[in-house]
Amino acid sequence: MIEKTCCPEELIDSYAQKLKVCGHPLRLKILCLIEKQDACVSDLWQCLEQPQPVISQHLAVLKDKGIVESSTEGNRRIYRITDEFVRNVISKF
């Protein structure tokens, strides 16, 4: 008989929501770039060849869900992954 050892429901729900948000192809690309080095919006849109507003909208979603945070360095807003679960998933790429 298989022992019933499941992950706690609150973790499952939290992880499922994070994976859903990160599952968008462009957000996944953004996270992969940020994981390699903290980046600003202009670095990201130039690398991904997407309009700046598109990148900003996706970063806003990631920030709203607590996956990334930003800080100001001079005249640049630098983004970094703050969620440990997401960082561990992205680091496997």
Image (cartoon, grey):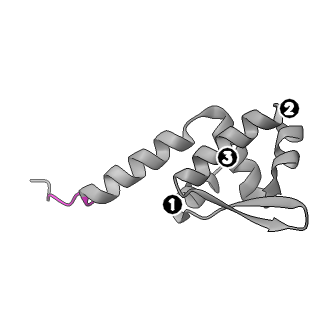
Q: Is residue 2 rendered to the left or right of residue 75?
A: left
Q: State which mark lies toward you, 2 or 3.
A: 3
Q: Which mark is residue 49?
A: 2
Q: Amino acid at mark 1?
A: Phe
Q: Is residue 78 above or below residue 41?
A: below
Q: Mark 1: which secondary structure?
A: helix
Residue extent of the magenta highlight:
4-8
Label 3 crowd bin: few (<14), some (14–19), many (20+), radius 10 Å: many
Residue 3: x percent and y percent? 14, 59
In the image, 32 versus 61, the foreground residue is: 61
- Whether tag 1 and tag 2 are in contact, CB under 8 A, the answer is no
Residue 41: x percent and y percent? 81, 48
Residue depicted at x 25% and y 60%:
8
Of mark 1 and mark 3, the one earlier in the sequence is 3
In the image, 20 versus 62, the foreground residue is: 62
Q: Is residue 74 rendered to the left or right of residue 16?
A: right
Q: CA distance from mark 2 to mark 3?
A: 15 Å
Q: Amino acid at mark 2?
A: Glu
